Image (cartoon, grey):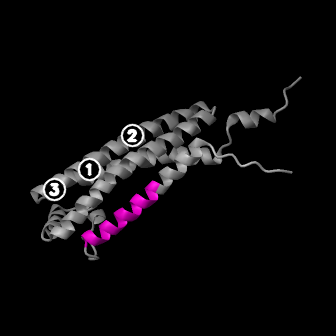
Amino acid sequence: MRFKITIRMKHVIWFIGLSLIGMILYKMYVFNQLSANYKSGYSYFWYNLSSSQSKADAIIRYWTSDEKRESYVRRLIMYDFAFIFIYVILLCNILYICLQQQNRLWLNKFLRTGIISIIIAGTLNLVQDYFNFLSIDRGYSYHFILIVTYAKWIFVLIAIVPLIMTLFLKPLRTIQKHIKPAV
């Protein structure tokens, strides 16, 4: 018995995409730690989730007080732009492939909603990063960034739920093949 390994172009694209995401996430992690100078509560992550204006402004003042920290934050945001582009393309591709395999009308509606949600989440992430750049340039934070951040994660969750649902459901076509027609 011979096993034949076929590598399709989509597998190569997936491998390259996931490798790029891994490398970008690693660089973002490193720049996040360097921007905070390994000081707890002053990283880019905590800036995006800071619930008070004074805390966000204190983080920005901490970053802008040193040119290296400021450049690390700027590089992190640039890597985040690349990450946004790649994750939107990959998740839309995954959702579309699941959409092609499912024949359930209710699940197809959720998958279409997931595609729209991930595009909205990517757009909100772009808006968030743009205003983070402006915050560094101007020296103060925009308080609505917290709302944008939470909205982004809500839309990502809306996109991921139907994807998880498809993992537990077989495509309807494969189930119907095994059902014998009534005579």
At numbered mark 3, what does the secondary structure look like: helix, strand or loop? Answer: helix
Q: Position of residue 37 (x, y in %)?
A: 25, 75
| Magenta stretch, residue numbers | 20-36
Alpha carbon separation for disc pair 3 and 2: 24 Å
Task: Indicate which disc, 1 or 2, sits on the residue closer to the N terminus.
Answer: 2
Q: Earlier in the sequence, mark 3 or mark 2?
A: 2
Amino acid type at mark 1: Gln
Q: Earlier in the sequence, mark 3 or mark 1?
A: 1
The x, y position of residue 143, in whole percent, is 18, 54
Please give the label number shown on residue 135.
3
The residue at the far top in this view is 183
Query: In the rendered picture of this protein, how many numbered marks are placed on residues?
Result: 3
Q: Is residue 22 magenta?
A: yes
Q: Left or right: 107 with respect to 57?
A: right
Residue corresponding to mark 1: 128
Secondary structure beneath label 2: helix
Q: Which mark is residue 119?
A: 2
The residue positioned 45% from the left and 59% from the top of the image is 22
Q: For mark 1, does the 10 Å Cα neighbourhood hold few (<14), some (14 to 19), or many (20 or more) residues?
A: many
- Name the residue at 34% across, 68% down: 30
